[in-house]
Image (cartoon, rainbow, N blue to C red):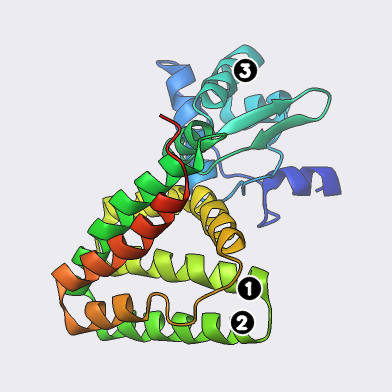
Amino acid sequence: MTSATSDRAGSSGEPPVLRAARRTGLIDQVIDQLRDQITGGTWAIGARIPTEAELAALTGTSRNTVREAVQSLVHAGLLERRQGSGTYVLAASELAGAVSRRVAGAHEHHILEVRRTLEVGAARLAATRRTPEDVARLRGLLAERTAASHRGDFERAVELDVDLHRAIGHAAHNPVLTDLYENFLDALSESVRLNFAMVGHIDDDEHAALVDAIEAGDGDSAATEAACYLDLLLDEVPDPD
């Protein structure tokens, strides 16, 4: 395999395992197979997928069929055509593509309102469903964030703060909520970064009471703590409406 083909094949370095499509519903079959390569991680985000000719050979279909299938996934937000370069993976799911397009350029106040909706509900559920492993992870992330703050590592502290919110979402043990969190991460990361920059420092005690409430199994207190710091931020960011 040439290096160019290896790059197109994704992070594994192996060619995609595709099968010859049946003659009925060819385009839909090819769409399903290409989507599987993306959602399964064979083609990583940012990777260039095989050419139309290569995909046609792999699926046993025509280049026109492949072209229509690829275009469908471009419209869905999973793929992106780059003139003179090829077609690249833009998102790992239709949800990720839709969320990314919708939040691009969105006002910070609106992002914060969505955060509040997700995080308050996630905190309440996490308090009632958390496992000892979930609590240990939350404690560890909180301690790591404090350590990063103390050594002045702003970027690492932001990453750990996002990881903490993400872990709370996972501790809710709701797969739909988890998917929403995973596909909202880019907007969440930017929101956290802007909020820290606006405040000018990282409060070591921020989220400590939230984690305490989750560990104690107190859903009402966890929801209140999650709402509290977000309401403060919302007060600082003007409502564009």
Disc 2/disc 1 C-alpha distance (Å): 6 Å
Earlier sequence position, callout 1 versus callout 3: 3
Earlier sequence position, callout 3 versus callout 2: 3
Whether residue 131 can be seen here: no
Q: For the residue marked with disc 3, what is the amino acid? A: Arg
SS label for mark 3: helix
Q: Residue under circle 3? A: 67
SS label for mark 1: helix
Q: Residue under circle 1? A: 156
**Residue at (58, 50) in percent of width and height:** 42
Dot 3: within a 10 Å radius of its alpha carbon, few (fewer than 14), some, or many (20 or more) residues?
A: some
Whether residue 144 can be seen here: yes
* Residue 125 or residue 29, whichever sits in front: 125
Q: Residue under circle 2? A: 148
Residue 229 location (% of width, % of height): 37, 64
Residue 122 location (% of width, % of height): 27, 61
Residue 17 location (% of width, % of height): 57, 44
**Residue at (24, 83) in percent of width and height:** 215
Q: Is residue 223 left or right of residue 157?
A: left
Q: For the residue marked with disc 2, what is the amino acid? A: Ala
Q: Are marks 2 and 1 in contact (CB under 8 Å)?
A: yes
Q: Is residue 84 left or right of residue 29?
A: right
Q: Which tag is nearer the camera, tag 3 or tag 2?
A: 2
SS label for mark 2: helix
